[in-house]
Image: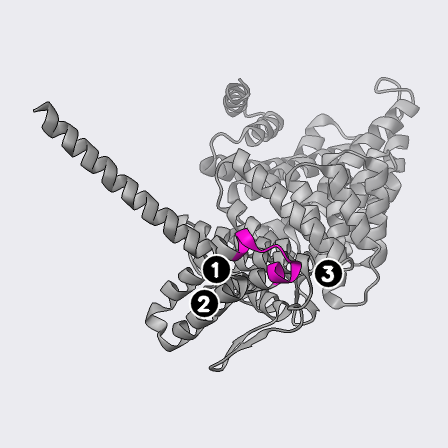
Amino acid sequence: MHSSRLKISVTLVGFITMCLLLFMADLAVSQNKSHSAVIGGVKVRFKNAVSQPADAQKYYEESIDLLLKNNVVRDEREKDKEETYFYLGSVYYYMREYKLAYDAFQNSLSHGKKFLEKGEHITGGIELFSIKECINDMKLKTFNQGNKAFNTALTMSAGDSSRTLYYQAIDKYNLILAWDPQSVINGTSYAATVYNLLANSYIQLMNSEKDEANKKILREKVLENLLKLSDADKSNLTVMYNIFIQYYDEKNYDKSIEWINKALTVETNDSLAKVIKSTLVQQKAYIYDNILGKTDEAFKTYEELIKSDPNNPDWHFNLARLYFGKNQNDKAIEELKIVKRLKPSDEESNFQVADEMFFAYQKQRSSEIEKHGGVAKADMKIVTEILKPDIEACKKNIMEAIDVMGKNLETSSDRAESHYRIGKFYNLLAELEGNLAYNLENKEKVKLQKPYFEKAVNSLKETIKINPTHKNAWQNLFVAYTNLQLVKERDEALKKFNELGK
């Protein structure tokens, strides 16, 4: 029993040893081939690959095996190494293993420049192109592969398949840049195009990404490539605008402003460029005004906008608002008058102008009363005479606003709010009538105000039909009912207002 096991073991060991010896012998023979013999063998296999395309892959793999096991290991002369790596790169090139081909060609060039501009002709009409031609062709084909993946992804809805294609495109574009940062193909630099496509690939991925941490990483990639693109194309306003957008989305407002200012220094008369610049100045004003609260910078930016477009009512309105903030009410109202002239039929501008002018009037009235001794001592005849032009102007603007809002009610995007604004303005008209009738008995004054308060009630009721939780509508109803001496309705409105205030 033991003897039988021993014989089997010896036999098995002998078999393994024999195989190992045969393998070593084969390796020794393979590695003893001369440089010229290996190159000759590779040439034969190139011919076979052309004549027997079905087996081409086998012949290319045999060629690589010959080159790696022999010449790469054994070559000592620089010119032999140069040729070995050239042939190795050529095999990889025909196999479309472009990354490996590029590395082999670089190794060849590190030992000599013989094959940089000149290739090799193998008997049978087989041509091995120069390294320069191969690398140019590899860049072109890799670029086209990236474009194919990118364009296909664009036609697909966001999902795993499109993401895979975008990443394939990114790999191809990055491979070209790794070979040549300038991405020169057929004598032309494609660096700007490649960076643009990379940035757009990352933008598409970012837009479909839901995880905020991953989105941040992708945005950094977008920025990285946009900044490189801007270096390659220093006067491209679209690129600068996109850089601004990325910083803005990151809430990096200092960088946003920095890139807006860079873009505004680019000299161009192109019509699209003018639109981009105008948009960027608007964004700059918005950031200063609504985000950073830098009033002086916002003020200067709106003035700059008005110089470029004096008939834009939005800039005049925003400038008016800033004037109010500086207590320069006269200038603010002048700007608002321009707004009314430029947008006579616009609901929002009519409302805002009337509202702001009434607010300015109230401040001015309080100031005049204080100037004349306060509420207890002021001569209201004098105060009213001083303010009469402002009261008439307020009435005119409010009535115009009511008219415009009434005409737009059917098409209003928020009918509840439109009814509320009309109701509020009727209350304001009643107040203005009361201010003008300072010398009348209270009963007579109420007669003048009553029609306005009644119209206010009608509009405000419409508001709460649509939106019962409109707190300001209930407050204005309380004011109107109080002045109409409708006690029950007044108390109900106050109750609703207080409930909504909790």
Looking at the image, residue 17 sits to the left or right of residue 274; the answer is: left
Counting the numbered discs, the total is 3
Marks 1 and 3, the one that precedes in the sequence? 1
Instruction: Report x, y in % for residue 163.
Output: 45, 50
Q: Which amino acid does label 2 sit on?
A: Gly
Specify the label residue 275 is tagged with: 3
Q: Please name the residue that numbered disc 2 is placed on.
A: 41
Looking at the image, residue 484 sits to the left or right of residue 12; the answer is: right
Q: Which amino acid does label 3 sit on?
A: Val
Marks 1 and 2, the one that precedes in the sequence? 1
Specify the label residue 317 is tagged with: none
Specify whether residue 337 is in view: no
Disc 1 element: loop
Q: Please name the residue that numbered disc 1 is placed on.
A: 33
Instruction: Report x, y in % for residue 404.
Output: 63, 52
Pointer 3: residues within 10 angstroms few (<14), some, or many (20+)? Answer: few
Q: In this view, does 88 lie above or below 426?
A: below
Q: Distance between the residues labelled 3 and 2?
A: 65 Å
Q: Which of marks 3 and 2 is in front?
A: 2
Q: Is residue 369 above or below residue 70?
A: above
Q: Quadrant of residue 422?
A: top right
